[in-house]
Image (cartoon, rainbow, N blue to C red):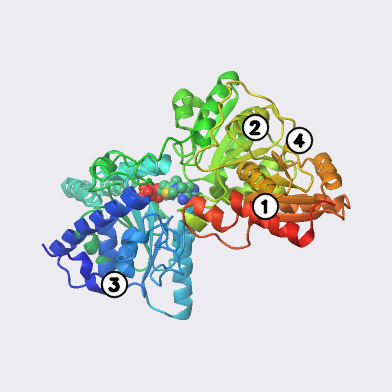
Amino acid sequence: MSNLLQNIHSPQDLKNLSFAQLEKLAGEIRELLIHTVAANGGHLAPNLGVVELTLALHKMFDSPNDKFVWDVGHQAYVHKILTGRRENFGTLRTAGGICGFPKRCESVHDAFGAGHSSTSISSALGIAIARDMTGAKYNVVAIIGDGSLTGGQAYEALNHAGHLGTNLTVILNDNEMSIAKNVGAMSEYLAKMRTAPTYSKVKHDIEYLLRRIPAIGDSVANTAERVKDSLKYLLVPGVLFEELGFTYFGPIDGHNIPSILEVLDKTKSVKGPVLIHLLTQKGKGYLPAERNADKFHGVGPFCVETGEVIKKSVEPPSYTQVFSEAIIKLAERNPDLVAITAAMPEGTGLKKFSVKFPKRFFDVGIAEQHAVTLAAGMATQGKRPVVVIYSTFLQRAYDQILHDVCLQNLPVIFMLDRAGIVGEDGATHHGVFDYSFLRHIPNMVIMAPKDENELQNMLFTAISLNTPVAIRYPRGSGVGVALKTDFTRLEVGKAEQLVEGKDLVLLAAGSMVEPCRSAAAFLKEKGIAAGVVNTRFIKPLDGQLIRQLARDNGVIVTVEDNVLTGGFGSAVLEYINSQHLNWVKVLRLGLPDKFIEHGQRGYLLEQYGLDAEGIAASVEQFIRQFGAGK
Ligand code: TPP
């Protein structure tokens, strides 16, 4: 059997393929997707669902002249395969290899970069407006999932596009799933459209009725017309989008290439914005992913035959798992405790909570901003909301944290999972800005645990406080300490001295504590006595201890997996400056002022000198250059 895919080097190579060949090609692409993701991990189910759509888009349009904007961008693998990146596709998500998301610097075919959701319609509209201003002629297509359509920005953009009447195609890829089952009233509306009689059937039935009304006077006919008009609001699919100024096409089978091509062709001549509603199946063509689209949304390496995820050697439970159990225990004691997720019940560890306390659990969709202000509202009424959002996605809700929570000093607890370097998802997903974007907001308390027990104790402590609190913890396993069954309240703003050392002290934040302990051991072998402090509180800092360290050691090394700009080390420097501790020598270790690429987490930490060896090496060099002690 000939292999069609090996001859596809650019979208041009699709132009002469027949429907049958395109269908065969779809099968070959699915094979490549499954085998590559089985080896490297990645977003399998979303990509399996858009194979036909992507083929149709590249056959009908002319990228890079025509522009495709992929929402979130986790489903752009097929697009990458068809746009000159097939041969390199085996490097997907590895350091220096193909990125798992669209990236403008990777290819001219990636019209807009993404990783966070619900931005596609805005950026596509921006491109289309710019096109019209310059008098250029090309098509702009935004592809957005029904999950991403739960994000507010998508509506801001629809609202604006409908108002302007700009030529723009929005493809709604409706698979009824976000990562988990999609939630919300819009999702229910889309479901209604799926089952509602199609527009033509309704129109046909009403026209039939109208024809049968005998000519018994205008009033009956008028009434019938009015009924017809009103019925549209009940039955016609897409009326909501039509009312927003879009021409709606659908729902259409998103796995039928001829149907997609037909509708794309039709829309080319339509003036103003168009919305095409495609129905697809997440995980299509690979049974384990069809059955378990949630698990295969983003998956680690797995066995192709069985669909079983390949387990690494026995690892301690993840921070997420520890949190998942701790919040249940604490919720049993406190009936006011409620938990909120923005479309990530599984990833945040809240699934178990949702089963145990369905009335105290809220999945708001991909709506981080709403999640935060919702929590603020609940907190005014005595509830204790725990908002669990990955560090990177909380960036969205900066003003809500500032204006709705902190300004009113409301006791909302933010659990920032996946903080620090996350690994293969790369620049859009690393949670390396949170110390910087939270630290300067008044009333906020920020903690970072050194291990699993401390995570539990921090949550316990946070619930007892009457202020906003953020607790940030990394992706993956904890350090493997024996889990305590009881909780201890931590003293706010008190650090923990772990190792004494006369030459310098390593002031470590959160997941940097363990590597710092090892670094201190390496340094000891070299004759350098390094102390280690677990800072625990990034805000408020333990000023008393910093003053004492300044007096006793004279060399302070701060270590954080956050950008150095405005991060923990900056906070220590500010404190030292405010206290006029002018003699102290400070070395700040953390991430540089640039976006960190994708690659394995351990590899990236090593690259940026944040593993034990790297920390020890930087300290040794500093001591050689500037001397130890005071
Ligand atoms: N919050 C933001 C702001 N961005 C994100 N990328 C996420 C959360 C995590 N996330 C990635 S994809 C996804 C979520 C919640 C679901 C997207 O669902 P949908 O748009 O329907 O795409 P599908 O995977 O179903 O094709």
Some atom of ligand 1 lies within 8 Å of the CB belonging to the residue at label 2: no
Q: Which amino acid does label 3 sit on?
A: Ser
Some atom of ligand 1 lies within 8 Å of the CB belonging to the residue at label 3: no
Residue 580 drawn at (x, y percent) = 89, 53
Q: Mark 1 points at which residue?
A: 436
Q: In this view, does 321 lie to the left or right of 212?
A: right
Which is more N-terminal, label 2 or label 1? 1
Which is more N-terminal, label 3 or label 2? 3
**Which quadrant would residue 520 be assigned to in this image?**
top right
Which is more N-terminal, label 1 or label 4? 1
Q: What residue type is labelled 2?
A: Met
Which is more N-terminal, label 2 or label 4? 2
Q: Residue 494 carries which label?
A: 4
Distance of label 3 from label 1 (alpha carbons): 42 Å
Q: Considering only vertical position in the picture, is 238 above or below 479?
A: below
Question: What is the quadrant of the N terminus in the image?
Answer: bottom left
Q: Name the residue nearer the viewer: 494 or 52.
A: 494
Q: Name the residue under label 3.
A: 10
Q: What residue type is labelled 1?
A: Ser
The residue positioned farthest toward the bottom in the image shown: 135
Q: In this view, does 194 lie to the left or right of 630?
A: left
Secondary structure under the numbered disc 2 in the rendered image: helix
Q: Name the residue under label 2.
A: 458
Secondary structure under the numbered disc 4 in the rendered image: loop
